[in-house]
Amino acid sequence: MTMMRGDTDAIRALQGLEDSRSSVRLRAALAVGTVPDPCFVDKLIERCAIEPEFFVRDMLTWALTRHRVSLTLPKLLREVRSERAQARGQALHTLSKIGDRQAWPAITRALLSDADDEVARSAWRAAVVLVPEGEEPALATSLATQLGRGERETQLSLSQALVALGEVAGPALHAATTAEDPRVRAHALATQRLLRDPDAGFELAIEEAKRVAALTGAPKADD
């Protein structure tokens, strides 16, 4: 009887993940994570790729972290190569929450420069969590190639990733302050300021950096 009840609960939870109501999907993901079972993993990953609601996606990720890494890791590594942007991004987000450095080789330069901003941001966050000791300078160099990209939210995410790497990001940021593109210079200068003072506001840092970048890029009087 207990086994039958367990099977019924599992079926109900799996069905709940596909319900048209986001509140039901959220409760189903919570239930699946509360009582993890290998039979849930494939469906959780499948739903991560298509779930439209942020809070439900976050609960799906939490539910996946409740399952054995040996079950989830290989499937998530396949997802980061998916053609679907949301599948890549959510898999990267989940890998960053699991924090197992076996996933590091999957964080490729292609993902760090993914054309989809959400995927790239997830890749930056995952990279900072998963980077092996000694690989931080190379990661900082790769991340610095994305300076100047996107709007405020994307730029802030990249700055936070570089700041999280600490002083090893210094040389890559310094090099970027002399870039031809004023957006790259401004973003690098703002990130340098945040690296020196993590409590500094990004808005003030980027506006000040834009002024400095404009001045440093202006032609000299005797040119």
Image (cartoon, rainbow, N blue to C red):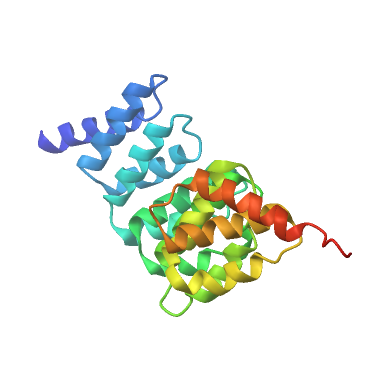
Q: Residue 80 or 218: which is nearer the viewer? A: 218
Residue 119, percent across and down?
56, 48
Asked whether residue 14 is in view, the answer is yes
Q: For the point 17% across and 34% down, which residue is it?
A: 4
Q: Residue 131 or 31: which is nearer the viewer? A: 131
Asked whether residue 79 is in view, the answer is no
Q: For the point 55% across and 55% down, which residue is it?
A: 190
Answer with left or right where residue 60 lies relative to residue 89.
left
Answer with left or right where residue 33 lies relative to residue 181.
left
Residue 14, percent across and down?
33, 33
Give the quarter of the image for residue 138.
bottom right
Q: For the point 32% across and 23% down, which residue is it?
A: 24
Residue 175, percent across and down?
64, 71
Q: Residue furthest top?
A: 21
**160 lies above or below 107:** above
Q: Residue furthest right?
A: 223
Give the quarter of the image for residue 213.
bottom right
Q: For the point 20% across and 41% down, which residue is it?
A: 34
Q: Quadrant of the N terminus?
A: top left
**111 lies above or below 178:** above
Q: Residue furthest front?
A: 221
Residue 100, percent across and down?
36, 65
Q: Residue 130 or 2: which is nearer the viewer? A: 130
